[in-house]
Image (tube, rainbow, N blue to C red):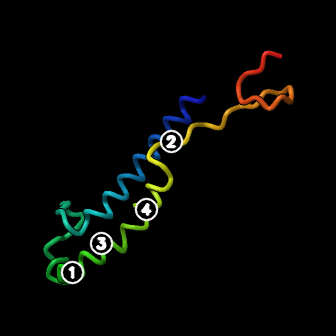
Amino acid sequence: MGGSVIELQRVLLGLQLFQVAFLWLHDWVPLGRLNDVAAVRRHDSLPRLVVVTLLQAMPWTVSRCSAGGTSPSPTPRRCGSGCGSATVCSS
Protein backbone atom coordinates (compact mmCIF):
# COMPACT_ATOMS: atom_id res chain seq x y z
CA MET A 1 0.00 0.00 0.00
CA GLY A 2 2.80 2.43 0.85
CA GLY A 3 4.38 2.02 -2.58
CA SER A 4 1.16 2.94 -4.39
CA VAL A 5 0.75 6.06 -2.24
CA ILE A 6 4.28 7.20 -3.00
CA GLU A 7 3.79 6.50 -6.71
CA LEU A 8 0.55 8.50 -6.70
CA GLN A 9 2.34 11.39 -4.96
CA ARG A 10 5.01 11.33 -7.67
CA VAL A 11 2.37 11.43 -10.41
CA LEU A 12 0.62 14.38 -8.74
CA LEU A 13 3.94 16.20 -8.29
CA GLY A 14 4.71 15.66 -11.97
CA LEU A 15 1.32 17.07 -12.96
CA GLN A 16 1.87 20.13 -10.78
CA LEU A 17 5.30 20.72 -12.30
CA PHE A 18 3.84 20.36 -15.81
CA GLN A 19 1.17 22.95 -14.97
CA VAL A 20 3.75 25.43 -13.66
CA ALA A 21 5.98 24.89 -16.71
CA PHE A 22 3.00 25.45 -19.02
CA LEU A 23 2.14 28.70 -17.24
CA TRP A 24 5.69 29.98 -17.71
CA LEU A 25 6.02 28.97 -21.35
CA HIS A 26 2.63 29.18 -23.07
CA ASP A 27 2.99 32.84 -24.17
CA TRP A 28 6.63 32.46 -25.22
CA VAL A 29 7.08 29.08 -26.93
CA PRO A 30 4.91 27.89 -29.83
CA LEU A 31 2.95 24.82 -28.75
CA GLY A 32 1.15 23.97 -31.96
CA ARG A 33 -2.61 24.39 -31.77
CA LEU A 34 -2.50 25.14 -28.03
CA ASN A 35 -1.35 28.74 -28.48
CA ASP A 36 -0.58 31.47 -30.99
CA VAL A 37 2.63 33.21 -29.97
CA ALA A 38 2.52 35.60 -32.93
CA ALA A 39 -0.94 36.83 -31.91
CA VAL A 40 0.20 37.34 -28.32
CA ARG A 41 3.20 39.37 -29.49
CA ARG A 42 0.99 41.51 -31.76
CA HIS A 43 -1.45 42.17 -28.93
CA ASP A 44 0.96 42.78 -26.03
CA SER A 45 4.24 44.66 -25.82
CA LEU A 46 7.29 42.85 -24.46
CA PRO A 47 7.25 44.61 -21.05
CA ARG A 48 3.54 43.84 -20.62
CA LEU A 49 4.11 40.21 -21.61
CA VAL A 50 6.87 39.89 -19.01
CA VAL A 51 4.65 41.40 -16.30
CA VAL A 52 1.67 39.20 -17.21
CA THR A 53 3.85 36.08 -17.22
CA LEU A 54 5.28 36.93 -13.80
CA LEU A 55 1.87 37.74 -12.31
CA GLN A 56 0.20 34.57 -13.55
CA ALA A 57 3.01 32.07 -12.93
CA MET A 58 4.80 33.35 -9.84
CA PRO A 59 2.12 32.44 -7.25
CA TRP A 60 1.99 28.84 -8.53
CA THR A 61 5.77 28.60 -8.61
CA VAL A 62 6.12 29.96 -5.08
CA SER A 63 3.43 27.63 -3.72
CA ARG A 64 5.04 24.61 -5.41
CA CYS A 65 8.48 25.54 -4.06
CA SER A 66 7.18 26.28 -0.56
CA ALA A 67 5.53 22.86 -0.45
CA GLY A 68 9.00 21.38 -0.72
CA GLY A 69 10.98 19.91 -3.54
CA THR A 70 9.94 16.38 -2.71
CA SER A 71 6.61 14.79 -2.07
CA PRO A 72 5.82 14.05 1.57
CA SER A 73 6.21 10.53 2.87
CA PRO A 74 3.16 8.67 4.13
CA THR A 75 2.18 9.27 7.75
CA PRO A 76 3.93 6.72 9.98
CA ARG A 77 1.75 4.21 11.80
CA ARG A 78 1.69 4.40 15.58
CA CYS A 79 1.84 1.23 17.61
CA GLY A 80 -1.27 0.26 19.54
CA SER A 81 0.34 -0.14 22.96
CA GLY A 82 0.21 3.57 23.75
CA CYS A 83 3.98 4.05 23.86
CA GLY A 84 3.80 6.70 21.13
CA SER A 85 6.47 5.07 19.02
CA ALA A 86 6.28 5.75 15.28
CA THR A 87 7.86 2.39 14.52
CA VAL A 88 6.51 -1.13 14.81
CA CYS A 89 6.21 -2.00 18.46
CA SER A 90 7.41 -5.34 19.79
CA SER A 91 4.80 -5.49 22.57
- Mark 3–mark 2 Cα distance, whole angstroms, equals 28 Å
- Mark 1–mark 2 Cα distance, whole angstroms, equals 37 Å
| Residue farthest to the top, as pictured | 90
- Left or right, 74 with reference to 6: right
- Specify which label sits upstream in the sequence, 3 or 4: 3
Q: Nearer the viewer, mark 3 or mark 2?
A: 3
Residue sitting nearer the eye, 8 or 60: 60
- Specify which label sits upstream in the sequence, 1 or 3: 1
Residue at figure coordinates x 18%, y 60% from the top left: 32
Disc 3 target residue: 53
Amino acid at dot 3: Thr
Q: Which mark is residue 47?
A: 1
Q: Position of residue 17 (x, y in %)?
A: 38, 52
Q: Secondary structure at mark 1?
A: helix
Disc 4 target residue: 62
- Left or right, 13 with reference to 33: right
Amino acid at dot 4: Val
Label pair 3/2, CB-CB below 8 angstroms: no
- Specify which label sits upstream in the sequence, 2 or 4: 2
Q: Secondary structure at mark 4?
A: helix
Q: Quadrant of residue 40?
A: bottom left
- Mark 3–mark 4 Cα distance, whole angstroms, equals 14 Å
Residue at figure coordinates x 47%, y 47% from the top left: 12
Label pair 1/4, CB-CB below 8 angstroms: no
Residue sitting nearer the eye, 17 or 33: 17
Q: Secondary structure at mark 2?
A: helix
What is the crowding at mark 3: few (fewer than 14 residues within 10 Å), some, or many (at least 20)? some
- Specify which label sits upstream in the sequence, 1 or 4: 1
Q: Nearer the viewer, mark 2 or mark 4?
A: 4
Disc 2 target residue: 9
- Specify which label sits upstream in the sequence, 3 or 2: 2
Label pair 1/2, CB-CB below 8 angstroms: no
